[in-house]
Amino acid sequence: MIFIVMGVSGCGKSTVGQLLAEKLSLPFYDADDFHFPENVKKMQSGIPLTDVDRKPWLTLLADNIKLWESSGGAVLACSALKQIYRDCLSSTTNPGVVRYIYLQGDKALLHSRLTSREAHFMPDTLLDSQLQTLETPADATHVSIAQPLDDMLSQILKDVNL
């Protein structure tokens, strides 16, 4: 099973993903680590990525998802903002192998988290762009980021029947 913890920047994808991976004894990967340098530079400059920018990154992730599936599963933190991105990520696996966990929160909470975060290439100025791009997934476990981490993890484990 591949679990993709998704949402906009600042929602806690990496934190929740790492906790989930630890709980499930699965490896954790952060999609940010797979970005190409030119895309990181764009984001650092406050320029939103286009679908064209994202395509090679999503394809690389999809190829890795296939490898992780064959190795017993993994947890991936990835924005996966649009349905076409999620379709690409799931394209190399059998149906039902990839489970999405959508971390949702209001703009004020997300903004406060982003402005307090250090050493990340994604500036808080791109939050509006990400929120505009976001297509809320219908086929995901929806988790509010306003609750404590332990409650979030409990909800996820319950919703995915683990």
Image (cartoon, rainbow, N blue to C red):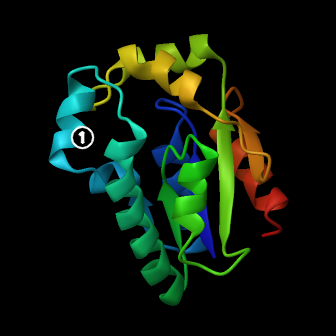
**Vertical position of residue 27 compared to residue 109: above or below:** below
Q: Is residue 119 visible?
A: no
Q: Which residue is mark 1?
A: 39
Corner quadrant of residue 117: top left
Q: Nearer the viewer, residue 155 or 35?
A: 35
Residue 58 placed where, x, y %?
41, 57
Query: Which residue: 53% across, 82% down?
Result: 69
Query: Which residue: 55% across, 32% down?
Result: 11
**Vertical position of residue 65 compared to residue 11: above or below:** below
Amino acid type of the residue that numbered disc 1 sits on in the rendered structure: Asn
Q: Quadrant of the C terminus?
A: bottom right
Q: Residue furthest bottom?
A: 70
**Vertical position of residue 132 compared to residue 39: above or below:** above
Q: Nearer the viewer, residue 154 or 112?
A: 112
Corner quadrant of residue 157: bottom right
Query: Which residue: 35% across, 66% down?
Result: 60
Residue 40 placed where, x, y %?
22, 38
Q: Nearer the viewer, residue 83 or 128?
A: 83
* Secondary element at image label 1: helix
**Vertical position of residue 151 compared to residue 44: above or below:** below
